[in-house]
Image (cartoon, helix red, strand yellow):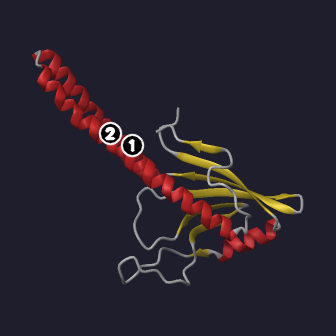
Amino acid sequence: MKFFPSQAFVLNTNISANSAWNNLSESLSNGQNISTGFFSRNQNTAPFKGHVFQGKFNIQRNLSYRNSFQAGISGEIFEDGSGSKIEVSLNLAPFVKVFLIIWCSFTSIFCIMFLFGAINAKDPNLAFGSLIPLGMLGFCYLIVSVGFKSDCEECRRALNVVFKVESQSVFQGKGWKNDF
Protein backbone atom coordinates (compact mmCIF):
# COMPACT_ATOMS: atom_id res chain seq x y z
CA MET A 1 0.00 0.00 0.00
CA LYS A 2 1.29 3.42 -0.94
CA PHE A 3 1.19 6.14 1.72
CA PHE A 4 2.26 9.06 -0.49
CA PRO A 5 0.82 10.30 -3.77
CA SER A 6 2.88 9.70 -6.88
CA GLN A 7 2.34 9.62 -10.61
CA ALA A 8 4.09 7.80 -13.42
CA PHE A 9 3.46 8.26 -17.12
CA VAL A 10 5.08 7.86 -20.52
CA LEU A 11 5.46 10.65 -23.07
CA ASN A 12 5.83 9.68 -26.72
CA THR A 13 7.38 12.23 -29.04
CA ASN A 14 8.46 12.44 -32.66
CA ILE A 15 11.87 13.98 -31.88
CA SER A 16 14.96 11.82 -31.48
CA ALA A 17 16.37 10.91 -28.07
CA ASN A 18 19.39 13.18 -28.67
CA SER A 19 17.09 16.10 -29.48
CA ALA A 20 15.04 15.32 -26.37
CA TRP A 21 18.21 15.39 -24.23
CA ASN A 22 19.24 18.68 -25.84
CA ASN A 23 15.79 20.21 -25.24
CA LEU A 24 15.88 19.08 -21.62
CA SER A 25 19.41 20.44 -21.08
CA GLU A 26 18.41 23.80 -22.56
CA SER A 27 15.40 24.01 -20.26
CA LEU A 28 17.48 23.58 -17.06
CA SER A 29 18.82 26.36 -14.86
CA ASN A 30 21.36 26.13 -12.05
CA GLY A 31 18.99 26.96 -9.20
CA GLN A 32 15.84 28.70 -8.08
CA ASN A 33 15.59 32.29 -9.19
CA ILE A 34 14.92 34.76 -6.41
CA SER A 35 12.33 37.29 -7.52
CA THR A 36 12.16 40.82 -6.19
CA GLY A 37 8.42 41.30 -6.67
CA PHE A 38 5.41 39.42 -5.44
CA PHE A 39 5.11 36.31 -7.67
CA SER A 40 7.10 38.04 -10.40
CA ARG A 41 9.03 35.81 -12.74
CA ASN A 42 11.49 36.66 -15.45
CA GLN A 43 10.18 35.28 -18.74
CA ASN A 44 13.74 34.22 -19.70
CA THR A 45 13.92 31.85 -16.73
CA ALA A 46 14.36 28.17 -17.58
CA PRO A 47 11.26 26.13 -16.68
CA PHE A 48 13.21 23.48 -14.75
CA LYS A 49 16.16 23.09 -12.38
CA GLY A 50 18.02 19.91 -11.65
CA HIS A 51 20.53 17.44 -13.01
CA VAL A 52 20.97 15.09 -15.95
CA PHE A 53 23.28 12.15 -15.30
CA GLN A 54 24.02 8.72 -16.84
CA GLY A 55 21.02 8.68 -19.15
CA LYS A 56 18.56 9.73 -16.44
CA PHE A 57 17.24 13.06 -15.20
CA ASN A 58 16.17 14.35 -11.80
CA ILE A 59 14.53 17.79 -12.00
CA GLN A 60 11.90 20.10 -10.49
CA ARG A 61 9.91 22.97 -11.90
CA ASN A 62 11.70 26.30 -11.40
CA LEU A 63 9.20 28.23 -9.27
CA SER A 64 9.30 31.82 -8.09
CA TYR A 65 7.31 30.79 -5.01
CA ARG A 66 7.54 28.02 -2.42
CA ASN A 67 5.47 24.85 -2.82
CA SER A 68 6.21 22.22 -0.19
CA PHE A 69 4.29 19.61 -2.16
CA GLN A 70 6.14 20.26 -5.41
CA ALA A 71 6.70 17.11 -7.42
CA GLY A 72 10.20 15.82 -7.94
CA ILE A 73 10.50 14.71 -11.56
CA SER A 74 12.73 11.79 -12.48
CA GLY A 75 12.89 9.78 -15.64
CA GLU A 76 14.68 8.30 -18.61
CA ILE A 77 14.62 8.92 -22.35
CA PHE A 78 14.68 6.00 -24.81
CA GLU A 79 14.82 5.70 -28.59
CA ASP A 80 11.47 4.51 -29.92
CA GLY A 81 11.37 3.98 -33.66
CA SER A 82 11.73 7.35 -35.39
CA GLY A 83 11.02 9.24 -32.14
CA SER A 84 11.61 8.76 -28.46
CA LYS A 85 9.82 7.59 -25.34
CA ILE A 86 10.20 9.45 -22.04
CA GLU A 87 9.30 7.55 -18.87
CA VAL A 88 8.53 10.03 -16.09
CA SER A 89 7.94 9.53 -12.38
CA LEU A 90 6.65 12.28 -10.06
CA ASN A 91 7.14 11.97 -6.28
CA LEU A 92 7.16 14.10 -3.13
CA ALA A 93 10.49 15.28 -1.72
CA PRO A 94 12.02 12.96 0.95
CA PHE A 95 11.94 15.70 3.63
CA VAL A 96 8.22 16.24 3.06
CA LYS A 97 7.62 12.49 3.35
CA VAL A 98 9.46 12.31 6.69
CA PHE A 99 7.61 15.37 8.01
CA LEU A 100 4.22 13.92 7.00
CA ILE A 101 4.99 10.58 8.64
CA ILE A 102 5.90 12.27 11.93
CA TRP A 103 2.99 14.73 11.82
CA CYS A 104 0.38 12.07 10.94
CA SER A 105 1.80 9.70 13.60
CA PHE A 106 1.46 12.27 16.39
CA THR A 107 -1.99 13.29 15.21
CA SER A 108 -3.12 9.64 15.14
CA ILE A 109 -1.73 9.07 18.64
CA PHE A 110 -3.70 12.07 19.98
CA CYS A 111 -6.86 10.77 18.30
CA ILE A 112 -6.42 7.36 19.93
CA MET A 113 -5.66 8.99 23.30
CA PHE A 114 -8.94 10.95 23.13
CA LEU A 115 -10.89 7.81 22.27
CA PHE A 116 -9.34 5.71 25.07
CA GLY A 117 -9.80 8.61 27.50
CA ALA A 118 -13.50 8.73 26.62
CA ILE A 119 -13.82 4.97 27.07
CA ASN A 120 -12.02 4.96 30.43
CA ALA A 121 -13.96 7.97 31.76
CA LYS A 122 -17.21 6.58 30.31
CA ASP A 123 -17.96 10.06 29.01
CA PRO A 124 -19.20 10.08 25.41
CA ASN A 125 -18.76 13.87 25.21
CA LEU A 126 -15.01 13.39 25.61
CA ALA A 127 -14.97 11.26 22.44
CA PHE A 128 -15.83 14.37 20.42
CA GLY A 129 -12.30 15.59 21.19
CA SER A 130 -11.03 12.93 18.78
CA LEU A 131 -12.76 14.78 15.94
CA ILE A 132 -10.08 17.50 16.07
CA PRO A 133 -7.18 15.12 15.25
CA LEU A 134 -9.36 13.36 12.67
CA GLY A 135 -10.07 16.74 11.06
CA MET A 136 -6.35 17.48 11.07
CA LEU A 137 -5.64 14.18 9.30
CA GLY A 138 -8.36 14.92 6.74
CA PHE A 139 -6.95 18.39 6.14
CA CYS A 140 -3.46 16.92 5.74
CA TYR A 141 -4.75 14.46 3.14
CA LEU A 142 -6.59 17.24 1.30
CA ILE A 143 -3.73 19.72 1.19
CA VAL A 144 -1.17 17.11 0.11
CA SER A 145 -3.44 15.66 -2.58
CA VAL A 146 -4.53 19.00 -4.03
CA GLY A 147 -1.05 20.56 -3.86
CA PHE A 148 0.68 17.57 -5.39
CA LYS A 149 -1.88 16.85 -8.11
CA SER A 150 -2.02 20.46 -9.27
CA ASP A 151 1.77 20.55 -9.48
CA CYS A 152 1.76 17.25 -11.41
CA GLU A 153 -0.55 18.74 -14.02
CA GLU A 154 1.74 21.76 -14.42
CA CYS A 155 4.79 19.48 -14.67
CA ARG A 156 3.15 17.43 -17.36
CA ARG A 157 2.23 20.53 -19.38
CA ALA A 158 5.76 21.91 -19.09
CA LEU A 159 7.31 18.56 -20.09
CA ASN A 160 4.98 18.37 -23.09
CA VAL A 161 6.33 21.73 -24.25
CA VAL A 162 9.99 20.81 -23.66
CA PHE A 163 9.74 17.47 -25.46
CA LYS A 164 7.35 18.79 -28.15
CA VAL A 165 4.72 16.18 -27.34
CA GLU A 166 1.43 16.26 -29.18
CA SER A 167 -1.42 16.92 -26.77
CA GLN A 168 -2.09 14.02 -24.44
CA SER A 169 -4.67 13.84 -21.69
CA VAL A 170 -3.25 14.74 -18.28
CA PHE A 171 -4.53 11.44 -16.90
CA GLN A 172 -3.32 9.28 -19.80
CA GLY A 173 -0.41 6.96 -19.11
CA LYS A 174 0.15 4.54 -16.26
CA GLY A 175 -2.28 6.61 -14.20
CA TRP A 176 -2.45 8.00 -10.70
CA LYS A 177 -1.02 5.99 -7.87
CA ASN A 178 -2.62 7.87 -5.04
CA ASP A 179 -3.19 5.72 -1.99
CA PHE A 180 -2.39 8.36 0.61
Q: Quarter of the image holding residue 45?
A: bottom right
Q: Secondary structure at mark 2?
A: helix
Q: Name the residue at 73% across, 64% down.
A: 165
For residue 147, which quarter of the picture? bottom left
- Find the residue positioned furthest to the right: 81
State the separation of the CA atoms marked 1 and 2: 6 Å
Packing grade of label 1 (10 A; few <14, some 14-19, many >=20) is: some
Number of residues whose C-alpha sits closer than 10 Å to that of mark 2, classed few (under 14), some (14–19) or many (20 or more):
some
168 sits left or right of 32 in the view: right
Give the residue type at disc 1: Tyr
Amino acid on which the number 2 mark rests in the picture: Leu
- Residue 2 location in percent, x, y? 52, 36
Residue 167 located left or right of residue 94: right
**Residue appearing at x 38%, y 50% in the figure:** 143
* Residue 143, above or below 131: below
Where's residue 21, x and y in %?
A: 74, 69
Residue at 41 percent across and 49 percent down: it is 144
Q: Are marks 1 and 2 in contact (CB under 8 Å)?
A: yes
Tell me: residue 138, above or below residue 12. Answer: above
Let me know if residue 93 appears in the view. Answer: no
Res. 97 mark: none
Residue 120 image position (x, y, % from top left): 14, 16
- Report the number of discs: 2
Q: Is residue 129 above or below residue 14?
A: above
Residue 177 shown left or right of residue 85 in the figure: left
Name the residue nearer the viewer: 66 or 123.
123
Q: List x then y, in percent, for residue 54.
A: 72, 61
| Res. 87 in view | yes
Residue that carries the numbered disc 2 in the rendered image: 137
Q: Residue at x 61, y 60 (%)?
A: 156
Which element is circle 1 on? helix
Which residue was labeled with disc 1?
141
